[in-house]
Amino acid sequence: MIWTKNILITGAKGFIGKNLIIELKNRGFTDLFEYDIDTDPSLLNDYCKDAEFVFHLAGVNRADTREEFLQGNYGFTSTLLDRLKEWNNTCPVMISSSIQAVLDNEYGKSKKAGEDLILQYAKDTGAEVFIYRFPNVFGKWCKPNYNSAIATFCYNIARGLPITVINPEVVLKLVYIDDLVEELVRALHGEANKKGDLCEVPKVYQISLSEITDLIYSFERSRRELSIPDMSNSLTKKLYSTFLSYLPEKELSIPLKTNADHRGSFTEFIKTKERGQISVNIIKPGYIKGNHWHHTKCEKFLVVKGTGVIRLRKIGTETIIKYFVNGDVLEVVDIPVGFVHNIINLGETDLVILMWANECFDPDKPDTYYMEV
C-alpha cells in the first residue's frame, strides 16, 4: 500500500526529519504534519486523528538525568500512542531507536523502553510498527559539536579547528542519511527491510575513527591540491559530499593558478590519480598551441567556445588529419599517443578548450616532445 497524504513526522526539525521531509516533498507528498518541540501541543491531537502514517523521529540524544532521557524517548512516545488510541487510529508507526538500545546506559535504556512500548502497542491495537535501531548517521544538515562525530570533524577540519579523538582505533557503524531516508520511504510504501521485530537500513559501513579523520583531512587538502578522492568507493564519496556541505559559505571558491603568455592561457582544474587531469586551455585569435607528441599520455579535447582546427599527424608519416571544431557543435576529439598534434584558433574570439589527460602533469617526466605537425 502507498500512503499519499496525512503523514505525521515528529522531530521534523531534526537532522533526519529535515532530510526526510525534503525528500517526501521531492516525491510529491504534500500533506505533511510537521511536529517538533516548538509546535503548538494542541496540534498533536489533530495530527493523530488524521494521520495515515507516522514517522516518529523525535527523541533526546543528550540529557543530564535519567528522567530527561525517559521523558524524551519514552514519555513523548507514550503520549503520541495514547493520542492515536484515543482516535482509534491504527495507522502504521515508524519509530527511530538506536543501536545503543542493547547497552546498559541511560540513553540506551530509554530507547529500549520506547521500543517495548511500541511493540506492546502493536499487540494491543494490531497496528503495523517499524522499529529502526539506527547506528551513527551522517550527512548534510547534521548539527556539529552535538551528537555526531563526523559532523564535528567535518565542521572543524573545514575551518582549521582542532578535533579530539580519544580512541582512534574504535570502529564505527555508519549509515548515510540518503540511504536511511530511502529505507524510510520504502517503509512508507510497505516495503520495509524487516528483521524480526526490528527493521534495518540495508547499507551500513564500518570504519575506524582514524580512517575517518584521515579521509576528512585528505578532503581538506584535496581542495588546495585540486585533487578528487576515489569516488568508486561509496563511503568515500558520501563522506566527501558530507564534508563539502560543512564548508564555510564564504570559502566555497578555490582560486586557480593560470599560466598565461601572448598565445593565451592554461589552467589546471581537476587532478586525480585514478582518472587523470582536466584543464582549461585558452588560445587567442590567430595563435597556435601544441606541436608536440606523447609516448603514454593520451588526451581528449573539447572546444566549448570559438572556432578552430585540431591537426594530427602520426609519427613517421606525412598525412595530416584535420578536425574543424567550434563551440556551437560540441564534440570530443581523441589525441592518441604517437601522434604529433596542435590546435589553431581560426576565429576572432578566444578559443576555449576543455582538455583531459590520462595522467596528471609531472614536471620531472612530462612525456611531451616538441615536433611540428
Image (tube, rainbow, N blue to C red):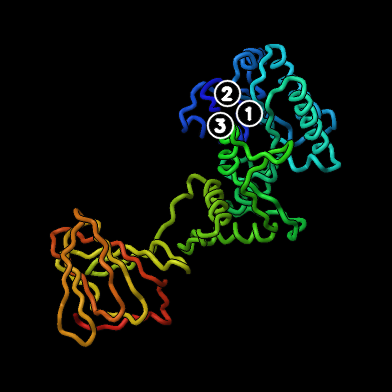
Q: Nearer the viewer, residue 275 or 5?
A: 5
> Mark 3 highlights which residue?
189
Q: Is residue 165 above or below residue 364?
A: above
Q: Spatial distance from mark 3 to mark 2, Cα to Cα?
A: 12 Å
Circle 3 SS class: loop
Using a 10 Å C-alpha cutoff, classify the residue at mark 2 as few (fewer than 14 neighbours), some (14 to 19) or many (20 or more).
many
> Please, what is the three-letter code of the amino acid marked with disc 3?
His
> Mark 2 highlights which residue?
7
Query: Mark 1 against mark 3, which lies toward the viewer?
Result: 3
Query: Do the residues under discs 1 and 2 have CB atoms within 8 angstroms?
Result: yes
Question: Residue 298, position in %: x, y?
Answer: 34, 74
Question: Residue 205, position in %: x, y?
Answer: 65, 53
Taking the spot 63% from the left edge, 53% from the top edge, the residue there is: 161
> Mark 1 highlights which residue?
55
Query: Do the residues under discs 3 and 2 have CB atoms within 8 angstroms?
Result: no
Label located before the other in sequence (1 or 2): 2
Q: Spatial distance from mark 1 to mark 2, Cα to Cα?
A: 8 Å
Residue 324 location, quadrant: bottom left
Taking the spot 84% from the left edge, 37% from the top edge, the residue there is: 106
Query: Do the residues under discs 1 and 3 have CB atoms within 8 angstroms?
Result: no
Question: Residue 173, position in %: x, y?
Answer: 69, 51
- Along the horizontal axis of the image, is 337 left or right of 180? left
Query: Mark 3 against mark 2, which lies toward the viewer?
Result: 3
Using a 10 Å C-alpha cutoff, classify the residue at mark 3 as few (fewer than 14 neighbours), some (14 to 19) or many (20 or more).
few
Residue 350 location, quadrant: bottom left
Circle 2 SS class: strand
> Please, what is the three-letter code of the amino acid marked with disc 1?
Phe
Label located before the other in sequence (3 or 2): 2
Circle 1 SS class: strand
Using a 10 Å C-alpha cutoff, classify the residue at mark 1 as few (fewer than 14 neighbours), some (14 to 19) or many (20 or more).
many
> Please, what is the three-letter code of the amino acid marked with disc 2?
Ile
Label located before the other in sequence (1 or 3): 1
